[in-house]
Every structure is written in structure tokens, then in C-alpha cells.
Amino acid sequence: MLLIKLNMSINKFRNLHQSGNPLLLANVWDAHSAQLAESVGCKAVGTSSHAISNSLGLEDGNNLSMDELLFFVKKIVKAVHIPVSVDIESGYAQDPSAIAQNIKTLANLGVVGINLEDSVTVNGQRTLVDANEFYNKLKSIIHILKEHNIDIFINLRTDTYVTKNPDALQETIKRGKLYKEAGVDGLFVPLIQNQADMREVIQEIGLPLNAFATKDGPNFDDCVKAGVHRISSDDAAYAKMIQLVKETYAGFNQKDLSALF
């Protein structure tokens, strides 16, 4: 019965990715933020590795441990009745079998999707890994998952625009085609903002495209016109909350008790 329910949830999550009617994925960092997203009608949530890392006093960029992530994921999955996707950054392991095991663990908790990225962060600097090497690694991961009958939405994050690749569009298309061949379900391209670029990526690759909201980036209608299938809130809500907390404590520390209210 649990497996049937999970398969229905995964299918529901897949069906939410529609061109012209993109899924608005609220990125959350704990059970309460997930519940708040559900309470206002969000149809699915995804974890923000950035927000979770920061909440533990860590910098974003593969500094979480799998055990630390699991603590949050278990609480989030139990707290809501909507699909939950999880950002696993680079997989929290090097070996494909270990990454596949991490994904299997998440699937067994009821997680319907994951984000996996093709870049690494060293000393705060994000760098793309070799496309062909990553393709082979990805193929191995997906093969292992299929061997264990793990069905999960794999949203592959390519950091071509984040790393300011000099030919970001063509590099995205090249990588996207490789990743589609490997068997991923969707392509996440942070900081892609030009409608024409979005449209070409979708047409050339043929995978659901995930973009995320930025202050000066395209608005919802722009994304719809481009055919985007999913828009993530990224860590924007967390950053907004943290700024308010900082301002509140600053006022309190200046003896302004009204700053708390």
C-alpha cells in the first residue's frame, strides 16, 4: 500500500511539470516552512540546501552531511501531504553506488524527487565538472536505481550560467542532451533569464525546464511565454526571513523593545 501511494505521488509530481502552467515549487528548510507553504496552497515543496546549510551555521556548497540532511527531510516529509523533492547538491558522496544509496534512502522516506548538480564548490568557488565524466557517473547512478526499482524524479542542475560559462547557452544544450540520454527527468538551469535562451533549451533538449526566481530576472508571465515547466523560489524566502530577524535583533539591541513587534 505504501509503495502504491508513493508511486501515485511521484506520478502526481511529474504531472505538475507542464509547459505554460509551470509548477511553483516552494523551497523550504524545515517542517514549519513546509507546512506554511502547504497552507497557502503550494502544490509541492523542495528543500533548499543553501537555507538548511545556513541554518546549521554552514556555508552553502556540499558542506552538509547526509545524516544532517536526513534529519530535516524526515521531519518535512512527515509534516506535509504534498510531494517533497530534495536538493542533494553533488550527492554527498563521490562513488555512484554511494550516491545511488543516498537517493534510495530518500525514496524510501517518501521523497518523490531530487536535485543533483554537475558542479563542485572548492574554497567558495563553484566549478563545472567535465560533462562526459559526469554523464558516465550519472548513467551509473540511474542504472543502479533502476536495478533497485527506485522511481524518483531526477532534476539535473547544470551550473553553466552560475559559473558564467562564456558560451552558457550552447554548453547547457550540450550537457542537457547528454543528461537526457543518461535518463534524467528534468533540467534545472539556475540564472537562465533570457526568454529566447529558455525557449531554445526546451526545444533542443526536450526535457522539462526548471528556472528559479531572481529579483531582477524574468517574471512569471515571461517564464510562461518561454515554456518553462517549473519555477523554484530558491532561498529567497529564507533570506528575507533572516534579514527581518537581523533587523529585529538590531533594534532590540539598541533598546528599542518595539522592534520585536
Image (tube, grey):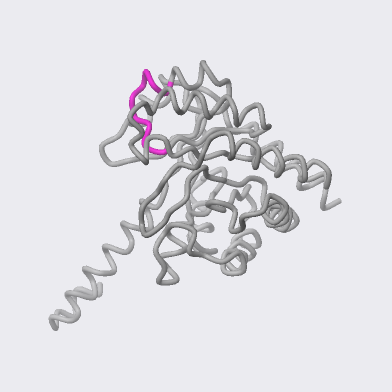
The image shows residue 7, relative to residue 70, as above or below, that is above
Does 163 sit left or right of 26 as displayed? left
Question: To which quarter of the image does residue 254 belong?
Answer: bottom left
At x 19%, y 74%, the residue is: 250
Q: Where does the image place residue 53, in percent across and percent down from the top left?
A: 45, 64
At x 54%, y 33%, the residue is: 187
Residue 134 painted magenta: no
Q: Where does the image place residue 3, in percent across and percent down from the top left?
A: 82, 49
At x 48%, y 64%, the residue is: 63
How many marks on residues? 0
Q: Where does the image place residue 94, in percent across and percent down from the top left?
A: 61, 55
The image shows residue 98, relative to residue 54, as above or below, that is above
At x 52%, y 17%, the residue is: 204
Front position in the image: 169 or 53: 169
Q: Give the range drawn in magenta.
A: 190-198
Question: To which quarter of the image does residue 10 belong?
Answer: top right
The quadrant of the image that shows the C terminus is bottom left
Q: Where does the image place residue 127, in percent across and percent down from the top left?
A: 42, 45
Front position in the image: 227 or 166: 166
The image shows residue 59, relative to residue 177, as above or below, that is below
